[in-house]
Amino acid sequence: MDDSQSSDFLSQSTDIFCNSPAVHTTSMDTVTYESLVLNTKSAFSSVRKEIKKATFSAYFSTLLEDCGTCISQSLDLIADLLSETSIKVSKLTEYMSDTVCLLQLLSDLIKNVIESISMSCSSMKTFPTITGRIIMLVFTHCKDSEAVYGSQLNNVEKQIKDMFRTCHELQLTYLMVLEKHYIFDLTEKEEQDILIQALDINLKIGEIVQSLDVKTMAEQWKAYTMICEKYSCNLMDKRIYSDSTKILCAMITNNINTALEDNQEEKVIVRSLKVSSFTLKILLRVCITFKHAVIKDYDSIMELLLYANTNNEAYLHTMSGKSSQFTSLFNNNVIGPVNCLLGELLYDDKFLQCICNYNIDNIKSEDKLLGLVLVVISAIRSLLQKGGDQLAKLKKHRLINVIYSLLPHCHVWFNMGLQYKCETSSRQYQTYGLYEHLLTHTVTLASMMISEEINILEKRMLEALLSTDCLSAMFTSNLWTVLARMSSRHFLLAQVVSLCKIYQKLEDKDLFMDSPQSIHLSRTLNRLFEIMPNEDKMKIYNMYNIRDEKNMTLWCCLKINSLPNEAQCYAEDIVMEHFKTHIGKLTSNENVHINVVTKSMLLVSTCTPMNRDDEMEALLIKGWTKACPTNMKHAVKDFNKGTLWYYKYVEALVILTESTEQIFNGNSVNFVKVLHIVSSIVHSSCKQLKLLLINILCKLANFETHGENKHVSDSILTQTFSELFDNTDSIVRNKLFNTLREYKCNNLYRIVSNVVNKDEDLKEAWTRFIRCGSTKKYSSIDLREQLQSTSNFVYSHKCIEPVEELRNSEPLSLQKSLSNNFDLIDLDTLFEPEDAEPACKKAKLNINEAEEIISRLETDTLLLSKIKENVFTNEYKNRIKSLCNKLHNIID
């Protein structure tokens, strides 16, 4: 027998009938036992004579108790024999034969009784519990037979089979009587208690027999549920539902675990999944029977749903490497019944609350998080399929709240490459990722909302857009856009106007423009504006005058190329003239705010490719020339509040160049100039600028140059990529390889190959990248660990950190603030032509005064250095350190 699920029932065998008056609290000796067995067998032979008497009920109860005592004692004597050094097999088989005989006699007795008289709880109170305990005791003994008999198992194999067979026969008789013949008067408290005790015993029997025989298990659970249905009206305020579901869920989980074990035998997999399927159906039946139960504990069911949904087809294929045959079998036997169970449970609002109130913090780093996402998706699908009153009564915003509470923790699972099937209109299947899977169902749920729920949804979406969590904001942007496509134009117009007002209100905040919220909100505005009807776009155009400088940033979000043709042409002329004016002022070193130049470039980048290629090329070159780092060493060495303008300026140049890259051709000298300036900035050794320029560098490498330009550009590109590949920073290296994957072309790969061939380790990594799409050979576990390590990154405004901390830290990330303090720097010296000498900053002191101060410092420092070190107190040392820091700041 299978002892994989060992029980503690066997250890209780000596006191299993402790509630029976015929129990002997001390072990009998052999003589007493044999005498009792003989008398009990003899009593069975007198049943036909006694059954006609009025006293038969008492006779039956006594006989039942004696039979139970004999069987319990025989199993105890077997255990005693097996503990001896010299085991008498003949005696062992004798005790086992006694048990088999008594089981058969008891089964025959019950059959005779129901054919002759009516069985009621009032006259035969002990029948449901004592008979149930006998069955439980013998089945437990059979289940644990390998552990009990050990080396003697082969010698008694026939007797064990006979014991199981006769106990199974008794089980069927007992269950049939309880279901059809035995009468409970449930108005009596005592009889109610007996029924509950009997159900509890049968619940334990059901747990035991699952590892013995599938047929026996099925018969036990079918009968159990039918008895529950028969008396359900009187059991709603009991713990039957909670106790049953707890055991059933544990059985299902254990069988799923068995099926999922690596290198498991096929027949064991099939059996485990079939048992899981059957047990799920029993669980569903119990849930239907007790849908109005007073005491409901959904914890075990919820954990089962999470576990089953975690092991969905995509997870089994990607994470566990299971075959399509296995996943198909698992879907049919587990996922299908689980979905049916979920659909039934959703009729109970309390269960929906269980989903909505589940503590995500406890599982956010576990596989169960994936299970919860899929439970929510399945719940949405099930509720939508039900429709009608069920959907109308559902407070849909509660599920929306669950989704938004899940999103910040889904970084790992959205990026693991899980693929889910979606049936198309042609009834064929296509696949999409978990992110799209969740988004699709959320859109469908949102589309069914009433106006009050829509208002709640809008508030939640706006909160997400204005949060720092990327996943929540990205999801919201997609959700908002899809819903807008499905809504009326008036709704869309109102949404865009509202978001424009919010954007402009936040734009005045110093921290906003360089925050994630700015990116989230601007991206959403752009997508919503794109899908608006032309008439409504014109309303927005007239509402926010493009000539007004305060609207420049807003139109960078909305984008000029989204306007109707006529308005677009007019707006492009305005924007272009504005750009020319400000880039001209910058070139001639006139007074101009660098923010305005940057905004102007960004606004031009939103125009369509214009028929001004020559003019645009000249303006672009002027902009890049001013960005040359030759005279900007103080700006590109590190970023802080005073130098972030340079990064923003280069970023705008990159965006503008990408939007107008068609202006370059292979013979263009200006192309080489831009490439040279980009290369110079990359060599500046500032990580942030390297990350910013990798993308445009790969794009520029795609241009086919000719003649002398080809030699120069190849030389520049080779030097630049060498600098990037030599960079030891993993972020720069990863960004480089991922971008190279995106911009595949022969020219780019030729240059890169020339660089990597000079280093064997680099060559190996590059070869692997070309072959596998990655510099390393990752397993799903490695990928998950990488994703997990980045999932806890939290955005913070670095500019509000202590000044000393900023000064001493490495430039890991850009400051999250745009400095408006450009008066700290002379605008005339922001940019200089490459061949010009750097202009001096305006001195606060004249040269003679500075010379005197520096000379005094040199003299005093020399004197200090001659003093013995041990003379300096801690106070002196701290003062010297403070002076050194101040001098260091002057140099920087």
Image: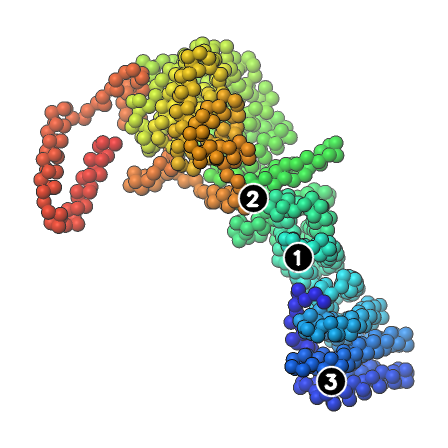
- Visible in this render: residue 705? yes
Residue 160 rendering spot, x and y as whole percentages: 76, 72
**Dot 3: element:** loop
Give the residue at x 46% y 32%. 763
Where, by quadrant of the figure, is residue 119 drawn? bottom right
Give the residue at x 82% y 78%. 101
Q: Is residue 305 above or below residue 624?
A: below
Q: Which residue is mark 1?
A: 258
What quarter of the picture does the N terminus occupy? bottom right
Q: Give yes or no for contact between labels 2 and 1 (Cβ–Cβ under 8 Å).
A: no
Residue 772 rendering spot, x and y as whole percentages: 55, 35
Q: Between marks 3 and 1, how big is the CA–CA gap?
A: 42 Å
Amino acid identity at mark 2: Ser
Q: Which mark is residue 22?
A: 3
Q: Which residue is mark 2?
A: 780
Where, by quadrant of the figure, is residue 865 drawn? top left
Amino acid identity at mark 1: Thr
Badge 2 or badge 1: first in the primary sequence: 1
Residue placed most toward the observer, 479 or 615: 615
